[in-house]
């Protein structure tokens, strides 16, 4: 220990600038490591507490501004490929000619990808699993605008309600929107009448609801795109709530800040190792003399590691103290959840991680010095 303190005093006296730079590296590493952890946890907490995770968006249609089928198609087809790949559509409107019956709604369920309308796979499977008769509408029928319909099972020929019988013809067709739809099947999953979306006349008015299902939780970028497209092609038709949604730009900024913080911390630790490497090069003569006088490699190694610990540990603790002061004075005003993520255990774990990694790097570098033979160093005139 006496020799370690002697080396440290000589280091401070003769290499003051390098010593100051090493202190700055340690202080910055302490601050940045603690801040990176706090920033990450603050962001995760904010996402859980403040952000709504929505996989379904049900938008009520305002009756006075209800869109036509043509407007709905323009709205859907204007959306980006990224949004369309994430979205399944459900849309419903009242059939005026069936308004007095138990099943007055016309429904369409579809996805629009690669400029084609198709039936959602999961919905098709559920409907087919609960078929009472017939079959589901096919994708070919959807794309060809076929006049076919799949109905709720109580509309089937096996159990036709009297109120509905009057608008069905003998050959199992439904007459509405001035068109005859052939009933191809009935399923317990269907609540009303489902037809191919492309078979619906352009002037049919959807006045009930539009529901969008998303594969991944809805984010603000997609939500704003949907609002913009609706405003352009279906002005004032939909009521959009003010949702707190994750913002991809914000997520990207936080991720970049965290990554940059970690890189700066690693760079600071690396600078510490390089600076100590410079000091060891200047001590080559002293280390050789120690070895000649019988000092073991282990003792030389222990002296170097002990010196690094005496430099790094107190200044890391000081850096953590400065960070805690700034945390309560400044940081928690901008990051409301950051002060709740720390504990003595957390600070200790971050400190232990830093010291272990730093000492491993220093240890490898020290071993490379003391493993060089004294004879080879003399021949190369390094001592």
Image (spheres, helix red, strand yellow):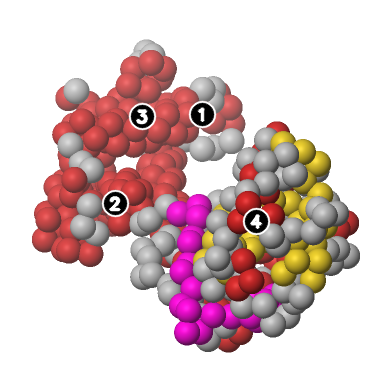
Look at the image and say whether residue 61 sits in the magenta stretch. Answer: yes
Residue sitting at 45 percent across and 54 percent down? 54
Q: Tell me how far mark 1 sits from mark 3, CA to CA.
A: 18 Å
Q: Is residue 129 above or below residue 101?
A: above
- Looking at the image, which is closer to me, 134 or 144? 134
Q: Are marks 3 and 4 in contact (CB under 8 Å)?
A: no
Q: Earlier in the sequence, mark 1 or mark 4?
A: 4
The residue where tag 3 is placed is 356
Q: Is residue 181 left or right of residue 337?
A: right
The residue where tag 4 is placed is 164
Q: Position of residue 209 (x, y in %)?
A: 52, 66
Nearer mark to the viewer, of 3 and 2: 2
Q: Position of residue 313 (x, y in %)?
A: 22, 36
Residue numbers of the magenta segment: 54-74
Residue sitting at 72 percent across and 39 percent down? 158
The residue where tag 1 is placed is 368
The residue where tag 2 is placed is 49
Neighbourhood count class around disc 4 (C-alpha, 10 Å): few under 14, some 14–19, many 20 upward? some
């Amino acid at each position: 220990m006496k020799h370690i303190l002697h080396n440290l005093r000589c280091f401070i006296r003769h290499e003051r600038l390098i010593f100051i730079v090493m202190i700055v590296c340690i202080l910055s590493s302490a601050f940045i490591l603690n801040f990176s952890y706090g920033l990450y946890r603050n962001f995760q907490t904010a996402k859980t507490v403040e952000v709504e995770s929505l996989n379904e968006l049900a938008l009520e249609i305002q009756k006075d501004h209800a869109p036509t089928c043509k407007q709905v198609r323009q709205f859907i087809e204007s959306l980006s490929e990224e949004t369309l790949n994430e979205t399944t559509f459900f849309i419903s409107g009242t059939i005026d000619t069936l308004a007095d019956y138990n099943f007055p709604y016309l429904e369409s369920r579809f996805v629009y990808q690669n400029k084609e309308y198709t039936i959602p796979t999961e919905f098709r499977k559920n409907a087919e699993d609960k078929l009472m008769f017939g079959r589901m509408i096919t994708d070919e029928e959807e794309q060809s605008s076929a006049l076919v319909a799949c109905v709720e099972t109580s509309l089937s020929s096996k159990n036709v309600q009297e109120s509905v019988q009057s608008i069905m013809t003998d050959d199992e067709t439904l007459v509405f929107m001035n068109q005859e739809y052939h009933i191809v099947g009935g399923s317990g999953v269907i609540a009303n009448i489902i037809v191919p979306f492309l078979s619906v006349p352009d002037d049919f008015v959807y006045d009930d609801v539009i529901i969008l299902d998303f594969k991944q939780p809805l984010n603000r970028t997609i939500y704003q795109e949907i609002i913009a497209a609706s405003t352009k092609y279906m002005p004032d038709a939909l009521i959009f709530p003010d949702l707190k949604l994750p913002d991809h730009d914000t997520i990207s900024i936080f991720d970049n800040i965290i990554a940059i913080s970690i890189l700066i911390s690693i760079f600071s630790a690396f600078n510490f190792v390089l600076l100590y490497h410079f000091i060891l090069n200047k001590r080559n003569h002293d280390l050789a003399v120690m070895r000649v006088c019988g000092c073991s490699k282990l003792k030389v190694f222990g002296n170097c590691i002990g010196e690094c610990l005496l430099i790094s540990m107190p200044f890391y603790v000081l850096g953590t103290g400065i960070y805690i002061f700034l945390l309560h004075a400044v940081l928690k005003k901008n990051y409301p959840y950051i002060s709740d993520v720390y504990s003595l255990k957390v600070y200790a774990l971050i400190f232990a991680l830093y010291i272990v990694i730093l000492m491993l790097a220093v240890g490898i570098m020290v071993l490379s010095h003391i493993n060089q033979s004294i004879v080879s160093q003399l021949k190369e005139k390094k001592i």
